[in-house]
Image (cartoon, rainbow, N blue to C red):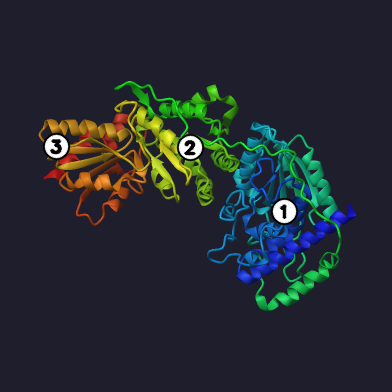
Amino acid sequence: MNQLKLFLEYKAYKLRLESLVMTAKAGSGHPTSCLSAADLVAAIFFYAMQFEPRNFNNPDNDRFILSKGHAAPLLYAAWKELGLLTENELYTYRQFGSTLEGHPTRRFAFAEVATGSLGMGLSIGAGIALSALADKREFNTYVLLGDSELTEGSIWEAAELASYNKLHNLIAIADCNRLGQTGETIHGYHMERYSAKFEAFGWHTIIIDGHDMTQIMGALDKARHEKHPTIILAKTIKGYGISEVENKNGYHGKAFVQTDMDSILKELDQRFAHAASYKSDFEWKPHIPKKAIEDSQSCVGVSVDEPVYKMAQMVATRKAYGQALAAIGKSCKQVVSLDAEVKNSTYAQLFEEVYPDRFFQCFIAEQNMVGMGIGFESRGKIPFISTFAAFFSRAYDQLRMAAIGTAPLRCCGSHAGVSIGQDGPSQMGLEDIALMSALPNSVVLYPGDAVSTYHLVQQMLEYNQGISYLRTTRPETPVIYNNTEEFHIGGCKVLRSTDHDKVCIVAAGITLFQALKAADQLISEGLAVSVIDLYSIKPLDRETLLKVAHSSGNKVVTVEDHYLQGGIGEQICYALRNENIKISCLAVTELPRSGKPEELLAWAGIDSASIIKTVKNLAK
């Protein structure tokens, strides 16, 4: 044990050394945050974790999440000490083109997920841990937290759900170094306050000196055998080892300058003399997991039951989503469903009814739900995440980080737009198209009927380049497509067209039926118009839009149940810019209120009567 302890202290010294050199060479970074956590990271990687370093994807490896992502140099240095990075690679930290970025992303081969926006690591870890229990795997998930991020509400959402699900395989380690970016953290060194909070949520807590390797090892040993989620609260010193910055405010995110490095490293060697001069024939070997059973099922191209809807049948697209989700769940066992306690509204309950072991109730905690989805995805699951469209805005930071980490989450936002009716503006998703479209590599889909919804859910199953978002509506709408109709990401459907169209109407979702009603009335009056179902908003089919617009008098009317800003109209204006096309955009432009759906569509100017008036004015 003594040899092992000395070895771990040597590794902690190396992590400190490399973090200091790394940040100095880069001229930026967070060395003081690394210095406080180096002992913890050394013990986690070289003592506690059971994993196969050269087989990162071994499904039975213990997993590590660096929630305090600004301490990224520790993560990179650990993998260098494991022999998977060279010194030259290590010192490309923060350089353009390097995979060793300021905060970890998946460009770095040994990062589970992207981190950096604080407060998310525990949710991600909970998702990974829950995935392990579902698959009956025995690995543990370690999450390194900073004490500053313990004020984030998402931390406590995760803590409660981890306890509820009895995630004994989730081990959090909090680096309580007292100092945040601008001053003392909320509880400073009052460790018992952190402990009381986590205990109240049902966690086992252990308070230790985070620079005492014997205490760290003992706490990690205890945590592995607990029957509840465990948090190790490690009292540490920010900047530990360098007197100039040690336990002093004002040095967060400040690298040492290169000209001072000789004296800095000399002091480090003096402070950790036994570790700096460590020489031993001790041979460290990783604890390889007991088993490594790969699950190689691919869900690309799987056969899914065809829909069985009837033409003109009234079906809400939210219900068709639930039916499609159950169908793909039958074909692909990697599909899991996460819902925020609205399963009877999103119709995710249809999946739960047939696959209860793959349905995870996340309750009213959308931030944690999306974070858990990131964790599930990192372990090879295909999470479909559902709630009201309006409430995804609460978890937008988690969605943003999922996009940065190229996590292909599948999200369904129901109850979109003023068409939900009497529930009022707090429940109306009117910003979601803009929010989801802004995410890199995202896909935004807005089907109008059950058939298109069903097929687009299948398209989401196979989209792995980023987040895909499906917008569904509360009211029932008639089925207008044959069950065998094909739908593709980036496509659209031309539903009305003649050789003498004067205007093209572009709509999606609930307003598609207002557009069709308006078109039929206009055509009966002798004014020919084309109608496009823009079921794929991002990417959109510019080629078809341009072609139909040119053949419709170079005049377009867009109509959507969404705010004007960032919606369908603005995106079409951008796509068709510089093409000499006149575009009128009908959208929600004021704060809505409660009312019947038909009243609200008319009030917003997005009903058939408003479309008819706009088309006639444009066609003059």
- Whole-number angstrom distance, CA of label 1 to CA of label 2: 42 Å
Q: How many marks?
A: 3
Quadrant of the rendered structure where residue 500 is? top left
- Whole-number angstrom distance, CA of label 3 to CA of label 2: 42 Å
Disc number for residue 300:
2
Quadrant of the rendered structure where residue 19 is? bottom right
Give the image location of residue 550, x and y in percent. Answer: 18, 48
Circle 3/circle 2 CB separation < 8 Å: no
Q: Name the one closer to the observer, 302 or 46.
A: 302
- Whole-number angstrom distance, CA of label 1 to CA of label 3: 68 Å
Judged left or right of residue 67, residue 44 is right
Mark 2 surroundings within 10 Å by alpha-carbon count, few (fewer than 14), some (14 through 19), many (20 or more):
few
Residue located at (61% from left, 68% from top): 28
Question: Can residue 67 be seen?
Answer: yes
Residue hosting label 3: 528
Judged left or right of residue 171, residue 57 is left
Give the image location of residue 346, x and y in percent. Answer: 46, 29
Question: Can residue 605 be seen?
Answer: no
Name the kind of residue labelled 2 in the image: Val
Residue hosting label 1: 175
Name the kind of residue labelled 3 in the image: Ala
